[in-house]
């Protein structure tokens, strides 16, 4: 499967995950301007971007970059849509990572959610759509995502899905070591 040629759509009874679109800007701005949510976003190795966007113009720049990244095969950014409200309430970014550290042969997953969705049940429902298919979409042995220690709801959801906390650092392009990653190992499934 080549996710960059044919991007799948995932859904369950509550959520849909599909490629981000231009019409998502208004809803995405609610996510990326949410000061309670921003500290939970993973900006590791993202050249200093903190993902706190407060204007439609800045949100459009980010969305355009995400679409270009998809076109160039760098990463996929899925919109997370709540079927009950038909709102985009977050995004999931994922890409295959090949580096000289523990997190090689890895589908690196970043989940950005509005703070009112930062609940274990909702996170579990969203991640259950994509965590296991990631092994096939990206041909990887592990899937990893970040959850800082204060992200208790995320950690609860990750544990319930079979993720384990890694003591290994993710080493950035400049040698910076990043911690607080949780790993789902396909060899354990």
Image (spheres, grey):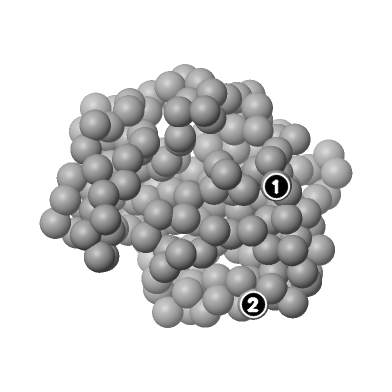
Q: Is mark 2 on a helix, strand or loop?
A: helix
Residue count near mark 1 (Cα–Cα under 10 Å), binned few <14, some 14–19, many ≥20: some
Drawn side of residue 21 relative to residue 40, left or right: right
- The answer to whether one can see residue 49 in this image is yes
Q: In this view, does 36 lie to the left or right of 40?
A: right
Using the numbered discs, state the Cα–Cα distance from disc 2 to disc 1 in whole angstroms: 19 Å
Number of the label disc, if any, that sits on residue 50: none
- Within 10 Å of the Cα at label 2, are there few (<14), some (14-19), or many (20+) other Cα atoms? few
> In the image, residue 111 lies at what x, y percent?
54, 46
Residue at the (53%, 23%) spot, across then down = 152
Query: What is the x, y in percent for residue 156?
Result: 51, 21
- Residue sticking out furthest to the right: 85
Q: Where is residue 122 in the image (x, y as percent from the top left)?
A: 65, 30
Residue positioned 41% across, 42% down in the render: 145
Q: Name the residue rendered at 21%, 38% in the picture.
A: 168
Q: In this view, does 142 lie above or below 70?
A: above
Can I make out residue 17 in this image? no
Position of the C terminus by quadrant? top left
Foreground: disc 2 or disc 1? 1
**Residue at 69% from the left image edge and 41% from the top image edge:** 36
* Mark 1 secondary-structure assignment: loop
Q: In this view, does 59 lie to the left or right of 109?
A: right
Quarter holding residue 131: top left
Name the residue carrying label 1: 35
Name above or below for residue 137 compared with residue 3. above
Q: Mark 2 points at which residue?
A: 61
Using the image as rendered, state which of residue 150 and residue 67 is in the foreground.
150
In the image, residue 147 lies at what x, y percent? Answer: 45, 35
């Amino acid at each position: 499967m080549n996710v960059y040629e044919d991007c799948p759509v995932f859904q369950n009874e509550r959520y849909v995950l599909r490629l981000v679109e231009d019409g998502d800007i208004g809803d995405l701005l609610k996510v990326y301007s949410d000061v309670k949510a921003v500290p939970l976003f993973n900006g590791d190795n993202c050249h200093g971007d903190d993902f706190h966007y407060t204007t439609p113009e800045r949100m459009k720049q980010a969305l355009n970059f995400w679409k270009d990244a998809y076109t160039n095969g760098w990463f996929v950014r899925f919109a997370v849509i709540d079927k009950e409200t038909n709102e985009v309430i977050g995004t999931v970014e994922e890409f295959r990572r090949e580096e000289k550290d523990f997190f090689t042969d890895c589908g690196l997953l970043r989940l950005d959610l509005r703070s009112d969705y930062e609940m274990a049940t909702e996170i579990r429902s969203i991640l259950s759509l994509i965590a296991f298919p990631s092994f096939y979409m990206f041909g990887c042995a592990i899937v990893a995502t970040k959850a800082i220690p204060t992200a208790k709801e995320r950690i609860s959801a990750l544990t319930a899905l079979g993720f384990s906390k890694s003591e290994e650092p993710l080493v950035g392009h400049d040698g910076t070591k990043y911690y607080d990653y949780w790993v789902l190992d396909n060899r354990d499934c």
